[in-house]
Amino acid sequence: MVLKKLKAIIEENASILYPDITLDTLFKDLYQDSLEEVDLLVKIEEAFRIKIDLRKKYTTVKDIVDYIEQVQND
């Protein structure tokens, strides 16, 4: 469920078209600069009603999914 919702947010907001977003997709491939990265993370925060540590680097989409699931289960 988290991955499906996250993919929809990414597809709607990413400036780079990414044909098949998977858990292994590199997060850095979904934006062009750090401003777009922060914007995307803020939209993820709003959609999932969580707070993401913007100082942390997320390598893959799985990293973000894992973080969201952890926060939601706490």
Image: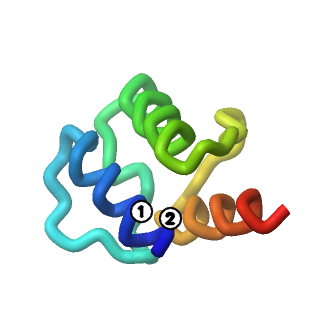
Q: Residue at x 43, y 76 (%)?
A: 24
Q: Is residue 5 left or right of residue 16?
A: right
Colouring method of the image: rainbow
Q: Position of residue 31 (x, y in %)?
A: 32, 41
Does residue 66 appear left or right of residue 9 in this picture? right
Q: Mark 1 is on which residue type?
A: Leu
Quarter residue 27 falls in: bottom left
Q: Earlier in the sequence, mark 1 or mark 2?
A: 1
Q: Amino acid at mark 2?
A: Thr
Q: Are marks 1 and 2 in contact (CB under 8 Å)?
A: yes
Examine the image and state in which quarter residue 51 appears.
top right
The residue wearing badge 2 is 60
Q: Position of residue 71 (x, y in %)?
A: 75, 58
Q: Nearer the viewer, residue 24 or 65?
A: 65
Q: Residue furthest top?
A: 35
Provide residue 10's location: percent of width, then percent of height. 32, 51
Compared with 1, 35 (above or below) is above
Q: In the image, is residue 6 above or below residue 57?
A: below
Dot 1 alpha-carbon crowd within 10 angstroms: few under 14, some 14 to 19, many 20 or more: some
The image's mark for residue 53 is: none
- Image label count: 2
Q: Secondary structure at mark 1?
A: loop
Instruction: Give the residue at mark 1.
Output: 26
Q: Quadrant of residue 18?
A: bottom left
